[in-house]
Image (spheres, rainbow, N blue to C red):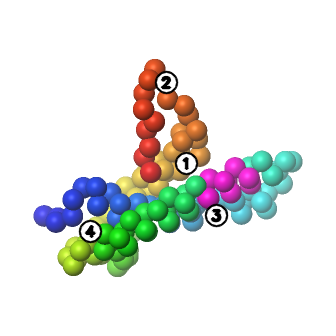
Amino acid sequence: MTRIPTNDRDLLEKAIYLPMLLIILNRDYTLIKNSPFKLPKPYLTWLSETMKAVQHDLAHVKTLMRKRRMKVEKLDSDDSFTMYLFHYKGYVEQHNYFNPRLRNKVEELLRFYLYERFQLPTNGEKTRQKK
């Protein structure tokens, strides 16, 4: 049973997912930069601006975590699971994440940052942010 409220746990998970997303975006940036694209600059600019948005959100997450006395540490990883240690206001909890779940969540965030964040709400819907 976790003592961490859902909102704070979501914040801790963002501290896991957003750095992974930055690694993927950096790798893609390097691939595009070294590929024989006819016009690579628009793609590189797009990825660069996306990385800035992710970095901005990650800085916000880290600021909130510092204010709320929260911290995440990666403990161990194998083929199936990755183990993290969550420090939350004096409590320490161990959480295991299924690696395909991590990959799927990072893919979902990649989709959000690359194009869903630019979509305008329709029919009076409020903007949906998965950050």
Does residue 84 appear in the picture of this structure?
Answer: no
Q: How many marks?
A: 4
Query: Sequence-wise, which precedes: disc 3 or disc 2?
Result: 3
Residue on which disc 4 sits:
95
Residue on which disc 2 sits:
122
Q: Quadrant of residue 49?
A: bottom right
Amino acid carrying mark 1 in the image: Tyr
Amino acid carrying mark 3 in the image: Asn
Q: Tell me the tag on residue 113.
A: 1
- Quarter holding the N terminus is bottom left
> Marks 3 and 2, how far apart in space?
32 Å
Query: Sequence-wise, which precedes: disc 1 or disc 3?
Result: 3
> Marks 4 and 1, how far apart in space?
26 Å
Q: Nearer the viewer, mark 1 or mark 3?
A: 1
Mark 2 touching mark 4, by CB under 8 A?
no
Query: Where does residue 51 sit, x and y in percent of width and height?
Result: 61, 58
Q: Tell me the tag on residue 26.
A: 3
Q: Count neighbours of disc 4 (C-alpha within 10 A) and say few if under 14, some if 14 to 19, many if 20 or more.
A: some
Query: Quick one: SS at disc 3?
Result: helix
Query: Where does residue 131 sit, x and y in percent of width and height?
Result: 44, 51
Which residue is drawn at the image coordinates 69% and 49% (left, top)?
46
Q: Which residues are magenta?
A: 44-52
Mark 3 touching mark 4, by CB under 8 A?
no
Query: Quick one: SS at disc 1?
Result: helix
